[in-house]
Image (spheres, rainbow, N blue to C red):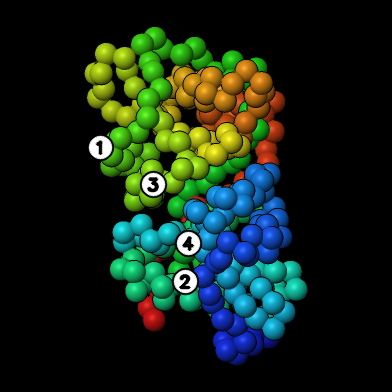
């Protein structure tokens, strides 16, 4: 191709992440351009490294990807190419290797999140058969901005998710199948849902994942604006009185996004969720 001068695949080699790769990971993590801090060294060693593959190349470690096989769905959580290795075909090569691994793990489709303004990445992923499924926006929300939402209905409580909640919540809010089950195994994720105190529920009311340190709520879904307020107030209560703001990823919820932005919530990131069938080998 004229746009990318490809190297031979033998120029790169994938290997599993190791605890000793932490500083390299942190350096490359910064290329994601997100407000969230990188995982701690302990979290890297126990949660992230085991599902991360690094790319060794002529310039040292030239990229990495963190993935999860969620049953029939393969999820690409992160994919980074070092600035010095870009425009050489490494991104495509890495995605092709990821697809191979997903096929070996029994996956039939794959998904990822990408910045809406990352034209090069969008072009790569769509060329591999991925299509836009959802869109999200990362908002920095304060306690005062949450008060702009309609009042919370009475009789609601925030409770931990149980295994029986995964499928109903996934179906109600269109989440990636298998994602909640996976996150439930990770110490850095705290999965919570909204419930009625009397135990009577006809449909899921909402859920959130309070990530380690409360840096961001993702995924976050609510059945209505009052239910969103109940979850957000619950998250602030968990994080303590010293926390004045937190990140919230609002997905396909224009009314909630509009109210919070009108109240002054800042935008840190806008993304598309892409999904597609795994390409044939």
Q: State which mark lies toward you, 2 or 4.
A: 4
Which residue does the image show at 51% across and 70% down from the upper left?
16
Q: Which residue is mark 4?
A: 51
Disc 1 is placed on an element classified as helix
Which residue does the image show at 25% across and 37% down from the upper left?
164
Q: Which residue is mark 3?
A: 185
Disc 4 is placed on an element classified as helix
Q: Residues within 10 Å of mark 3 (few under 14, many from 20)?
A: few
Q: Which residue is mark 1?
A: 164
Q: Nearer the viewer, residue 110 or 263?
A: 110
CB contact under 8 Å: marks 2 and 1: no
Q: State which mark lies toward you, 4 or 1.
A: 4
Quarter where residue 224 is shown:
top left
Q: Residues within 10 Å of mark 2 (few under 14, many from 20)?
A: many
Decide which of tag 4 and tag 1 comes sooner along the chain: 4
Decide which of tag 3 and tag 2 comes sooner along the chain: 2
Q: Residues within 10 Å of mark 1 (few under 14, many from 20)?
A: few
Decide which of tag 2 and tag 1 comes sooner along the chain: 2
Decide which of tag 3 and tag 1 comes sooner along the chain: 1
CB contact under 8 Å: marks 3 and 2: no
Which residue does the image show at 69% across and 83% down from the upper left?
58
Quarter where residue 205 is shown:
top left
Q: Is residue 180 above or below residue 234?
A: below
Q: Which residue is mark 2?
A: 98
**For this view, does 117 lie left or right of residue 272?**
right
- Farthest right residue? 84
Give percent across and percent down for residue 163. 28, 39
């Amino acid at each position: 191709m004229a746009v990318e001068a490809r190297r031979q695949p033998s120029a790169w080699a994938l290997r599993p992440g190791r605890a000793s790769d932490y500083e390299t990971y942190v350096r490359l993590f910064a290329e994601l351009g997100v407000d969230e801090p990188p995982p701690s060294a302990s979290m890297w060693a126990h949660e992230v490294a085991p599902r991360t593959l690094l790319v060794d190349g002529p310039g040292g470690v030239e990229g990495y990807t963190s993935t999860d096989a969620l049953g029939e769905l393969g999820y690409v959580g992160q994919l980074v190419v070092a600035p010095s290795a870009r425009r050489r075909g490494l991104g495509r090569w890495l995605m092709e290797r990821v697809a191979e691994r997903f096929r070996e793990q029994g996956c039939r489709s794959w998904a990822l999140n990408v910045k809406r303004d990352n034209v090069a990445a969008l072009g790569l992923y769509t060329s591999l058969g991925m299509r836009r499924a959802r869109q999200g926006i990362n908002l920095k929300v304060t306690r005062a901005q949450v008060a702009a939402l309609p009042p919370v209905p009475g009789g609601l409580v925030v409770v931990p998710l149980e295994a029986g909640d995964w499928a109903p919540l996934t179906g109600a809010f269109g989440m990636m199948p298998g994602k909640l089950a996976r996150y439930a195994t990770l110490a850095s994720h705290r999965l919570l849902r909204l419930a009625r105190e009397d135990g009577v529920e006809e449909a899921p009311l909402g859920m959130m994942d309070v990530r380690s340190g409360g840096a961001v709520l993702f995924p976050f879904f609510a059945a209505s604006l009052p239910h969103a307020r109940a979850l957000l107030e619950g998250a602030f209560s968990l994080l303590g009185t010293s926390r004045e703001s937190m990140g919230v990823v609002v997905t396909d919820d224009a009314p909630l996004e509009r109210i919070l932005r009108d109240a002054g919530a800042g935008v840190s990131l806008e993304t598309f969720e892409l999904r597609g069938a795994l390409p044939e080998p």
